[in-house]
Amino acid sequence: MKPAELPVNECRIGAMALAAPRRQSTSFCWYSNIIAFCDNRSEALEKEWSLESLGAGGAHLDFVITRLPCRIGRSKESDLVIANLGLSRVHAVLARDISGHIRLVDENSTNGTFVNRRRIEGYCLLNDGDIIHFASAEFKLRMRLVDQGTVLAFDEMHTMVIPENAALSEHFVQNEAEFEELLRGHGLSGALQPIVDARTRQVVGYELLGRANHPLLPNAPIELFGLAEALDRELELSLAFRDFGVNKFAPSVSGNILFINAHPKETFNASFLASLVRLRRSFPEMNIVVEIHESAVTDVKKLRHLADRLEELGIRFAYDDFGAGQARLLELADVPAHFVKFDMAMIRGLHKASERKRQVIRDLVKMVLATGSVPLAEGVEVEEEAQICIEMGFQLIQGYLTGKPVPADSD
């Protein structure tokens, strides 16, 4: 339904830099993250009403209402356009009431208009300090008496100074377009790090590590996954790294174990298992071990189901970063993995550690061996660490001592 023609004393307000309706004698200014289009023919109110909102970082921002009525909604024809899908196209109207208050009328909106967190039916007279929600968009109404002779037109008002410590909003993420390019393969890369027998130092497998060389994105996986988290796309990035790496390195790891990583969020996701099914079909002979991060090991029932499905695919699994947060001893006993990778934080400097720490790790290694799993020490950088690991019972080691990651583009 087309909105009725507005009276001359009105306030046109828009958001998200929407274009102003075509009309004569219109001025415009920014205030409280809202663009106001004001008809210069209107008369000023005797009371100054304002809508207060909270900006990024908790900064209080005020929008002064000097013209009424104002239609609120999502439609471009509304006077106050709020870019929020929870609002109806024509949601509510603020109008002058004969009592001197502002009258708030709900226009049969889908998600409702609320005053002091109570949904209104029809209309409500507003008071100073009332909290108003147009669906989920929140404002507080403020009123103060002003000397009408001091009230300036919008185009004559001074710019509001925002506090220096007011943070910029972060609703959008930088480099989203470049991240999309990465997921499509532009800038994707990877590396292999050898895993060796602790005693003989013979290579028994490789861990596949995700990398990137996109000119506008960070190279480090932890930073890339930080960006993916902001976009809620960690699963897609993890899959992109796996697919690229396996296809790139499959010929060079023939005959060895390939350890591949899984993001904690995807461990029990159906799409993760589907990706492993595709992987097995493409590489039926590959010796694959899936690394399950310790933080994802929280549900024994789900973990047992995952282990059964992996066994059906001929894929083994490892508990990764064991001891990084808390050693999952119950899961270790109930659903033993083929390999248990001890976190590098437990290994580095082990030859200098106290006897108490060494004894704790020694006992954990014994528990791992008792379940039939193979203990693997990550982050071994010096020979002294390697010797302590051998003495404790570690069967495999991984780290700079025995081989740094080799990038995909290396000869």
Image (tube, rainbow, N blue to C red):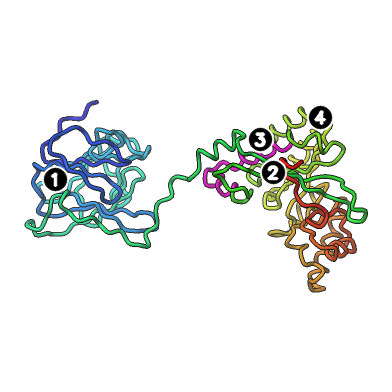
Q: Residue furthest left?
A: 149
Compared with residue 271, is residue 200 higher up or lower down, i.e. above or below?
below
Q: Which residue is mark 2?
A: 262
Residue type at mark 4 is Pro
Q: CA distance from mark 3 to mark 2?
A: 13 Å
Residue position marked by numbered label 1 in the rendering: 96
Viewer-closest of 56 and 208: 208
User: Residue at the location (15% across, 54% down)?
Assistant: 48
Left or right: where 410 falls relative to 33: right
Secondary structure that dominates the magenta span: helix
Left or right placement of residue 287 versus residue 180 in this view:
right
Classify 10 Å Cα crowding around label 3: few (below 14), some (14-19), many (20 and above): few
| Residue at the limit of the structure toward the right, as seen here | 200
Answer whether residue 352 is magenta in the image.
no
Q: CA distance from mark 2 to mark 1?
A: 60 Å
The residue indicated by pointer 3 is: 270
Disc 3 marks a residue whose amino acid type is Ala
